[in-house]
């Protein structure tokens, strides 16, 4: 084997160290909050909603219906039905997101099994619907905020969005209306209507927890390492970037401003990229109500 020059070895070690991943403290923080979020969702399901025959949307809603019909553990269905989406997420969105999602779903599945024998906090269906939706929404919001997911429906919607003329939110809404409507045939139409209320309450709670459920976000980054950050966004997120010329009002220095549009599932990864390359970089992220033109929806998510 040809000997690698000392300077090259040092540079390689430097680059490897730079890209080893997030610090252990951040990993532990992410693990802790995803754990808390998954347990809260399990509490919302097993302590409030499921005992009162009120369901959630998405894969969890399908799992509740199947668990009721077949008599198997809810946690088993949640885990098995989400497994395909773990592999899809791994390929389409990234390793960190996929592993965070697998961890969250595993905790959710185990927690629902452990909490199943616990009696419901209330037999008042309306109270159970409202407080179950709030608890569930807080849990899901925490998990999303820390870079994971507890339901494969959103991943499926992202993939379908590339071939259908509908937004991710519209596709998810269609899935959930179908699933919640199916509850009417299984639990009765009054329970289906309560399920719609629970879904709405959970949706608005998630909105509060993660400060916006818009699928798209704009990001503005100012850094001396703009070229490295821009290249990393293109390579690791598969998103296009635009370099804008700016001028500091106080110093009068010329600045390069990076502008890009991302999905909210990519926000955590974008922050990680920027922090890895320049801890002093200025980063602003804002919700976007609508994105038109360009090739944003056609971009693959890595």
Image (cartoon, rainbow, N blue to C red):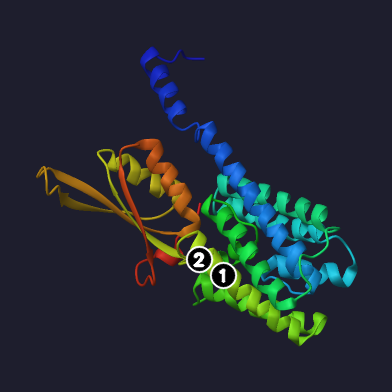
Residue lying at 80% horizontally and 55% vertically, measured from the top left: 115
Q: CA distance from mark 1 to mark 2?
A: 6 Å
In this view of the protein, which residue sits in the foreground, 38 or 167? Answer: 38
Q: Position of residue 10 (x, y in %)?
A: 40, 18
SS assignment at label 2: helix
What residue did someone put label 1 on?
203
Check the image and name the residue furthest to the right: 71
SS assignment at label 1: helix
What residue did someone put label 2 on?
207
Q: Position of residue 224 (x, y in %)?
A: 24, 38
Where on the picture, by quarter, is residue 99? top right
Q: Position of residue 19 (x, y in %)?
A: 46, 33
Residue 69 is at least partly visible in this image: yes
Against 220, residue 188 (above or below) is: below
Residue lying at 60% horizontally and 54% vertically, measured from the top left: 89
Decide if residue 62 is on the left or right side of residue 145.
Answer: right
């Amino acid at each position: 084997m040809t000997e690698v020059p000392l300077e090259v070895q040092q540079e390689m070690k430097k680059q490897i160290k730079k890209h080893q991943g997030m610090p252990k403290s951040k990993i532990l923080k992410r693990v802790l909050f995803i754990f808390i979020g998954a347990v809260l969702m399990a509490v919302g399901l097993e302590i409030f909603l499921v005992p009162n025959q009120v369901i959630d949307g998405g894969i969890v809603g399908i799992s509740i219906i199947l668990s009721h019909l077949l008599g198997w553990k809810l946690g088993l269905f949640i885990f098995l039905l989400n497994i395909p989406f773990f592999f899809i997420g791994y390929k389409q969105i990234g390793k960190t997101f996929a592993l965070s999602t697998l961890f969250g779903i595993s905790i959710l599945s185990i927690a629902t099994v452990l909490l199943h024998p616990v009696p419901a906090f209330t037999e008042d269906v309306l109270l159970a619907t409202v407080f179950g939706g709030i608890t569930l929404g807080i849990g899901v919001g925490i998990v999303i905020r820390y870079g994971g997911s507890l339901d494969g429906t959103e991943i499926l919607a992202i993939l379908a969005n590339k071939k259908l003329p509908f937004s991710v939110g519209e596709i998810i809404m269609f899935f959930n209306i179908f699933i919640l409507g199916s509850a009417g045939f299984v639990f009765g139409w009054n329970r289906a209507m309560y399920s719609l209320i629970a879904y709405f309450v959970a949706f608005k709670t998630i909105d509060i927890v993660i400060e916006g459920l818009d699928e798209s976000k704009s990001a503005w980054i100012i850094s001396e390492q703009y070229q490295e950050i821009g290249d990393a966004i293109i390579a690791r997120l598969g998103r296009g970037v635009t370099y804008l010329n700016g001028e500091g009002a106080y110093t009068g220095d010329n600045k390069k401003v990076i502008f890009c549009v991302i999905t909210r599932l990519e926000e955590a990864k974008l922050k990680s990229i920027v922090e890895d390359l320049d801890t002093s970089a200025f980063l602003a992220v804002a919700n976007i109500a609508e994105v038109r033109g360009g090739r944003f929806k056609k971009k693959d998510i890595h």
